[in-house]
Amino acid sequence: MKFREHRGHLSDSLATQREFQDREEVTRHVIDLLKAQGTGEVPAGLVSFTPYGGDDQRIGWKDVHIVEVTGYGVVGFVDNDTENP
């Protein structure tokens, strides 16, 4: 599963792209990102994955999902989210 942080420009967002095994790994990464930004400890239950327009033809990602944290907002996007078809 690919993850990229939300940025103002697609190229900036893609520069943050990383690969993870599953949602659990992405969730841990998101929690670490926010903690490093000074947000504090974020409970894993506040991280959500929501379908976001299907495929992104610009970059070849399939089944794109937006990653959000309740009370914070959009953190990034993942591709090929097969855990919740």
Image: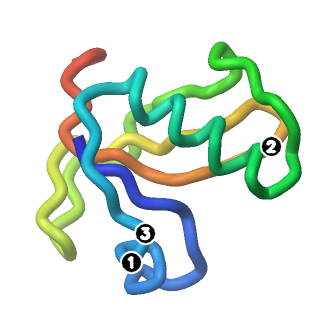
Query: What residue sits right under mark 2 in the picture?
Result: 72
Q: Residue 62 carries which label?
A: none
Residue 42 drawn at (x, y percent): 77, 28
- Amino acid tagged 1: Ala
Separation of disc 3 and disc 2 at Cα?
Answer: 19 Å
Mark 3: few, some, or many residues within 10 Å (few <14, many ≥20)? few
Instruction: Please tell me in which quadrant of the rendered image residue 8 appears.
Output: bottom right
- Are discs 3 and 2 less than 8 Å apart at CB? no
- Amino acid tagged 3: Thr
Dot in front, 1 or 2:
1
Mark 2: few, some, or many residues within 10 Å (few <14, many ≥20)? few
Query: What residue sits right under mark 1 in the picture?
Result: 15
44 or 80, which lies in front?
Answer: 44
Q: Is residue 66 above or below residue 17?
A: above
Judged from the image, the secondary structure of the residue bearing numbered disc 3 is loop
- Are discs 1 and 3 less than 8 Å apart at CB? yes
Residue 71 drawn at (x, y percent): 85, 35
The count of marks equals 3
- Amino acid tagged 2: Tyr
Judged from the image, the secondary structure of the residue bearing numbered disc 2 is loop
Separation of disc 1 and disc 3 at Cα?
Answer: 4 Å
**Left or right: 35, with 2 as reference point:** right
Separation of disc 1 and disc 2 at Cα?
Answer: 22 Å
Q: Residue 16 carries which label?
A: 3
- Residue lying at 74% horizontally and 53% vertically, measured from the top left: 36
Q: In this view, does 33 lie above or below 7?
A: above
**Left or right: 49, with 85 as reference point:** right
**Left or right: 52, with 7 as reference point:** left
Ranked by sequence position, the earlier of labels 3 and 2 is 3
Residue 10 drawn at (x, y percent): 41, 80
What quarter of the picture does the N terminus occupy?
top left
